[in-house]
Amino acid sequence: MLVTELRFSDSINVATSPEHLYDLVSDISRMGEWSPICTACWWNDGDGPRVGAWFTGRNETAESTWETKSQITAAERGREFTFQVGGSFVRWSYTFAPIGEGAILTESWEFLPDGIAFFHKNFGDDAEAQIANRARDAREGIPQTLAAIKVTAEAK
């Protein structure tokens, strides 16, 4: 697997403000409505969308179900909402840019070096296949997630 395959991003134009999009996306309890893999998220210790806060996410595929702990690393209303799974394994980022009377929503995913090491430690000989599966899921899931967020954001 090439390093360039360990990151992906896509964007969509949404007929709403960057601030409204941020408010939707930073409410991690709603991610299960939009993501094809993440079925639920909740704040740990009653926290909320601020840098340093942690949340738990439940993910499901046909092969398995697992939970992750993620930490918010950027939380700037109307501009960026970013979190890292495991604190340093995988980075998910949402950026919001004004365009006309709407916004461009970009979702980005990157498998980080600590995540690669974690997968090799935990999956052994199957690590590369597991990493490839996660990369495939991100490439296929991001456009679906963006489209679903757009529907919610534009609903009147």
Image: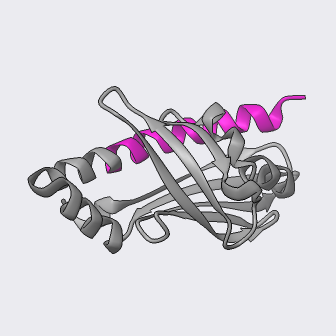
Q: Which residue is pictured at 42% across the width and 47% down the height?
A: 138
Q: Is residue 8 left or right of residue 72?
A: left
Q: Which residue is pictured at 20% across the width and 64% down the height?
A: 121
Q: Is residue 56 magenta?
A: no
Image spot of residue 51 (x, y percent): 70, 72
Taking depth in this image into account, of 135 and 32 the one nearest to the observer is: 32
Q: Is residue 15 left or right of residue 12?
A: right
The C terminus: image quadrant: top right
The residue stretch that appears in magenta = 135-156
Q: Is residue 18 left or right of residue 110?
A: right
Q: Which residue is pictured at 13% across the width and 50% down the height?
A: 126
**Vertical position of residue 47 compared to residue 114: above or below:** above
**Vertical position of residue 28 compared to residue 81: above or below:** above
Q: Is residue 151 magenta?
A: yes
- Residue 119, image quadrant: bottom left
Q: Which residue is pictured at 71% across the width and 57% down the height?
A: 45
Colouring used for the render: one colour
Image spot of residue 62 (x, y percent): 34, 26
Secondary structure character of the magenta stretch overall? helix
Outermost residue, front side: 45
